[in-house]
């Protein structure tokens, strides 16, 4: 990756982070004195790469009727859908934020003592260590409800479709199912096919949903959505394989959470099942598949393409 591309990606992630933090500060302001909202905001604010909301924005930009070099890098940008309708920044930012709310809830609940029992997240104390388990549980539930109410408040023509994408990606057809399969498989160990199934649901579904939501807001056609489903699924699976690899190769300082935790807990991971080198090859192959899909869609010269390359190059 060139230095130029790396800078472009980092700037875009920072741009996304600023937008969603600004949105969530206002979104939570009415309940700012509630412990539950404070805990939710704490977990949102402590950091994170902001990949999912960045994918929503990047996909919306890729499928908009904009010149790809247009100056959308400002707070009140507007994007035109493929049918020429203008979409306001606030509505796209609401969609991006909803994905980050759901992702943050999943991290809060994943860290709980009854799940992974991790006390560090994003380089800071996990939500339940800082606020106690009952507040952390309610903060997670609060984030789920806020995500769907943020989508519901948008004036998007495709609002219902976007709500359905997030519901499918995060619920029993997606992330929740993946997490449940992961927990059930922990004790007995899983086959490589089962591991693909777990990763595709636990992690890839939300990443895929973020890419689909941005495109659907911009009126992507059903053929485009079909191709994008594969793009998102491959990128999402690659993301989790890289996560498994980083758990072996990275440091706790870089990751902002304990490393080596997967093998210590006897979790089934790609490196444990097929080895480190094969895992790296698998992740590269999946990103190639994603790129092929984007090429077919004529989206090779976009920030969406660059963000997908970041899945492979990320260091934390
Ligand atoms: C109770 C069955 C049940 C489900 C609840 C807790 C939960 C739902 C799901 C857990 C899903 C989960 C934690 C998946 C892991 C995905 C993953 C690799 C997260 C790390 O994402 P990053 O690296 O994190 O993007 P940052 O901090 O950068 O945002």
Image: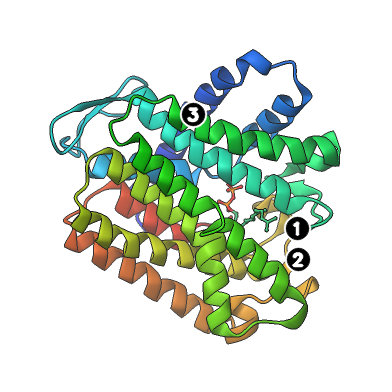
* Label 2 Cα neighbours within 10 Å, binned few <14 / some 14-19 / many ≥20: some
Q: Is mark 1 within 8 Å of ligand 1?
A: no
User: Quadrant where the N terminus lies?
Assistant: bottom left
Q: Does 88 sit above or below residue 121?
A: above
Q: Residue at x 77, y 39 (%)?
A: 136
Residue at the location (57% across, 61% down)? 202
The percent coordinates of residue 228 (x first, y second) are: 29, 58
Q: Secondary structure at mark 1?
A: loop
> Which of the pair 56/202 is nearer the observer?
202
Where is the C terminus found, in terms of image quarters? bottom right
- Mark 2, secondary structure of its residue: helix
Residue 145 in sight from this viewpoint: yes
> Rounded to the nearest whole Å, what is the CA distance between mark 2 and mark 1?
6 Å
Q: Nearer the viewer, mark 3 or mark 2?
A: 3
The CA span between labels 1 and 3 is 32 Å
Residue pictured at 60% horizontal, 39% vertical: 144
Q: Which residue is found at the position 61% from the left and 21% from the top?
A: 28
| 103 versus 152 height, above or below | below
- Answer whether residue 10 is visible to the viewer in this image: no
Quadrant in which residue 245 is drawn: bottom right
Residue marked by disc 3: 150
- Residue 261, numbered circle: 2
Q: Position of residue 107 (x, y in %)?
A: 66, 48
Residue behind mark 1: 258
Q: Are marks 2 and 1 in contact (CB under 8 Å)?
A: yes
């Amino acid at each position: 990756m060139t230095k130029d591309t790396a800078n472009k990606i980092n700037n875009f992630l920072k741009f996304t982070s600023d937008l969603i933090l600004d949105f969530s500060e206002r979104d939570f302001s009415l309940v700012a004195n509630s412990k539950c909202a404070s805990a939710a905001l704490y977990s949102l604010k402590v950091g994170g790469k902001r990949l999912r909301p960045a994918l929503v924005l990047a996909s919306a930009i890729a499928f908009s009727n904009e010149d790809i070099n247009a100056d959308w890098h400002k707070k009140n940008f507007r994007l035109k859908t493929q049918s020429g309708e203008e979409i306001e920044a606030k509505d796209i930012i609401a969609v991006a934020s909803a994905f980050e709310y759901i992702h943050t809830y999943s991290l809060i609940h994943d860290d709980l003592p009854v799940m992974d029992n991790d006390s560090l997240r994003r380089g800071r104390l996990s939500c339940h260590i800082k606020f106690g388990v009952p507040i952390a549980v309610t903060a997670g539930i609060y984030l789920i409800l806020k995500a769907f109410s943020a989508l519901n408040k948008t004036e998007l023509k495709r609002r219902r479709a976007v709500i359905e994408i997030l519901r499918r990606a995060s619920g029993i057809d997606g992330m929740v199912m993946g997490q449940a399969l992961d927990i059930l498989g922990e004790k007995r160990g899983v086959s490589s096919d089962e591991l693909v199934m777990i990763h595709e649901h636990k992690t890839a579904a939300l990443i895929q949903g973020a890419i689909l939501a941005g495109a659907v807001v911009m009126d992507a056609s059903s053929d485009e959505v079909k191709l994008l489903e594969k793009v998102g699924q491959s990128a999402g699976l690659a993301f989790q394989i890289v996560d498994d690899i980083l758990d072996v190769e990275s440091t706790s300082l870089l990751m902002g959470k304990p490393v080596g935790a997967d093998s210590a807990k006897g979790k089934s991971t790609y490196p444990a099942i097929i080895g480190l080198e094969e895992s790296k090859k698998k992740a590269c192959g999946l990103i190639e598949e994603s790129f092929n899909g984007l090429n077919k869609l004529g989206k090779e010269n976009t920030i969406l393409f660059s963000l997908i390359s970041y899945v492979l190059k990320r260091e934390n």
